[in-house]
Image (spheres, rainbow, N blue to C red):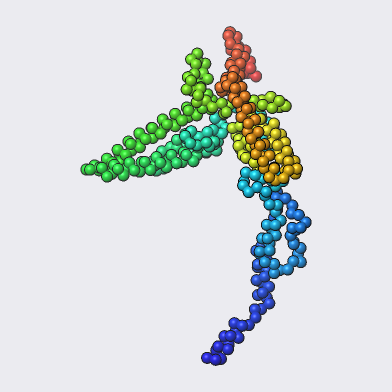
Amino acid sequence: MKQLSKRLTKRFSAPVPISKKEGKRTSVTSTFSLPIFHRGSSVPDSTTTLNTSPTSSPTSSPTSTSKSTSTSRVPSLASSATYATPISSRNASPRLPQTLQSTPHSPYNPLANYVPCLYSTCKTHYLPTLLGPTFYLPQAPYNLCRTRGLCPSHARKDLLNANARCKKEYERMRQNAGRKTLGTIAEEFACWVDELRAVRSTASKENERALRTKMLGPSSKSTKKKPDQGEQDQWDWRYMLRPCTSNACTQEHYYSIFDQRFYLWYSTMRKSGLQIMQTLCPACARLDIDAAERKMLEKWQEMHPQQWREWMERFKRDRAAEHGFWEQAQENRVRERGCVKGVEVKEKKKKNKDEVVPEGKGVDTLKEPCVMM
């Protein structure tokens, strides 16, 4: 036993070979790479430079690299996410692509761009063209269709509730069947599902009609009957084309903030905490937000951080008040202009084309040489 214990103690007390030590060290150092600075972060100062030389010792611990990365970044002066230093966030803000600033030549159709969800408490806007060709087709297991006029999230929830209702109704029919056979229950359930399918189809048509009234206004057909006051109240002027409120605007065209090219740019909050002015066209809004962020940077370099926060609060309130004033002016202008202006212009063009078509005697004889040629 003594010889066995001596052998065991000698075996476990032996030093580790040098080759195994080096392997452990290299594996530790290889798992931790040097920090990478993002575009939004600033360059570290000379006092917090990292030891990135190849002659650094291989025994550097992971804690040293984590400390160096934390000290190399410029700390944010604001505790909340609403404040961000202009130096670290100005370049990370979304920008309007140069290719999207041109105005389309075709008439603007609000229904082909971002549309609102008709659910009572939902404020989501979605693009109908991104839903896909099978989104409104009958879905298993009861061949029910999704209700139109709802955003994708609420449309899926509505379909799930309808399927759960069908399952519950089938279980109720089976429990109260009495002496009925399964075939009879299946026929009654199929009739019940057909009625539910018809009700959902009617609801989809009503939602489409309500969506058209909300975005396009009352029907613009050539009738002498004036639209009802209820239809006028349901119309939301914001989905129509609006003029730019800048005096220095050189673009003589109307724009829409719900255009599929500009909606994400208008609705996204900037990293600086500012909102893009929706009362300006894309070109003027880009110049305005660049000037505002440039002013923020100048104030940041001049003021104390606490004074800069207070100035930012006043600056945001002033921009919000300015936006409300010019938005009211845009609403008055759009309501004076009328509903469905793009559709009316399109109809006028068709009428002009029809007037050019020659009619009367001799027209057929003139067409025959053209066909022969």
* Residue projecting furthest to the right: 46
Q: Is residue 363 left or right of residue 154?
A: right
Residue 172 in sight here: yes
Res. 242 in view: no
Q: Residue furthest bottom?
A: 2
Query: Along the horizontal axis of the image, is 103 left or right of 133?
Result: right
Q: Position of residue 269 (x, y in %)?
A: 62, 40
Picture coordinates of residue 49, whole percent (x, y): 75, 58
Q: Position of residue 59 (x, y in %)?
A: 69, 69
- Which residue lies at the image location 68% right of the left edge and 63% below the top edge? 64
Between 332 and 156, the one lying in front of the other is 332
Give how far across and how far down residue 217 sits, in percent: 52, 24
Q: Is residue 171 above or below residue 228?
A: below
Q: Give the quarter of the image for residue 346.
A: top right
Left-right relation of 116 to 139: right
Q: Residue at x 59, y 24 (%)?
A: 331
Horizontal placement of 135 versus 249: left or right?
Answer: left
Q: Is residue 91 above or below residue 346?
A: below
Q: Quadrant of residue 291?
A: top right
Residue closest to the far left: 179
- Residue at 63 percent across and 31 percent down: it is 321
Q: Is residue 29 above or below residue 43?
A: below
Residue toward you, 312 or 259? 312
Picture residue at 51% right of the left edge, 18% below the top:
221
